[in-house]
Amino acid sequence: MMKLYYTPHTCALATHIALEEVGATYATTRIDFASNQQRSPDYLKINPKGRVPALVTDRGVLTETPAMLAFVAQSFPAAGLAPLDDPFAFAELQAFNSYLCSSLHVAHAHRMRGSRWVDSGDAVAIAAMQRHVPQSVTAGFEQIEHDMLKGPWVMGERYTICDPYLFTLAQWMEADGVDLARIPRVVDHRRRMSERATVKKAIAQELGGPLR
């Protein structure tokens, strides 16, 4: 049985939703950032990066959300969460998720994790990064709004593993100072995602503690 290590309000939610979408049998373990549990020796044995999420499978541990989402989709092909029979379409899907991971999420992280990029004592540099977040994150979502969102779902008419990932990052837009009026399609996507039973269940499980 798979086990997902997560912390509420992080990108772990994307994989959590995907596991619900495919009907997987899995367990969850909550990692407490407040007590720095992600840096504990026990957790570092699971994920030496000291971050969440991590997904324990019968073949080993996976980290990085795009990889985990692809694994879920490929492990449960009947769920249809990725175009597994079309190499180009699958690459397009991976390109979108890679953009979320390498660009949009990084821009968001400048708001509260500036010490990853500059000295933790450099208050001026950290404050400058924080001030830039509304502009950089809004620009990232505008790129999605105008050039990457193909239809009611990210890839068009078909719901895929891109959708829970976009939804997860969209949860943070208000805190990042994003101008929602400039991205109405992204906002509508978030609303429709929030109405899905699988999404409601995953969020309730994360906020309520361990799943099983």
Image (cartoon, rainbow, N blue to C red):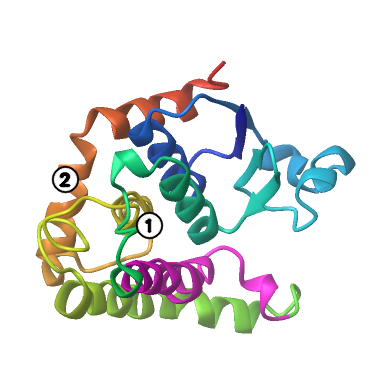
Residue designated by label 1 = 169
From mark 1 to mark 2, how far is it between C-alphas?
13 Å
Please provide the residue range marked out in magenta: 90-118
Q: Which quadrant of the rendered structure holds the N terminus?
A: top right
Tell me whether the residue at label 1 lies in contact with that at label 2, contact meaning CB atoms closer than 8 angstroms. Answer: no
Instruction: Specify whether residue 129 is painted magenta.
Output: no
Q: How far across and how far down the image is residue 158, in percent? A: 17, 53
Residue 122 falls in which quadrant of the image?
bottom right
Q: Amino acid at mark 1?
A: Leu
* Disc assigned to residue 191: 2
What residue do we see at 85% from left, 38% from top?
A: 42
What residue do we see at 16% from left, 45% from top?
A: 191
Q: Which quadrant of the rendered structure holds the C terminus?
A: top right
The majority secondary structure of the magenta stretch comes to: helix
Look at the numbered disc 2 and give the secondary structure of its residue.
helix
Q: Nearer the viewer, residue 137 or 48?
A: 48
Residue 62, compared with residue 197, is above or below; it is below
Asked if residue 94 lies left or right of residue 146, the reply is right
Residue 160, compared with residue 146, is above or below; it is above
Q: How far across and how far down the image is residue 99, in percent? A: 41, 74
What residue do we see at 29% from left, 74% from top?
A: 138
Q: How far across and how far down the image is residue 167, in percent? A: 30, 51
Residue 56 falls in which quadrant of the image?
top right
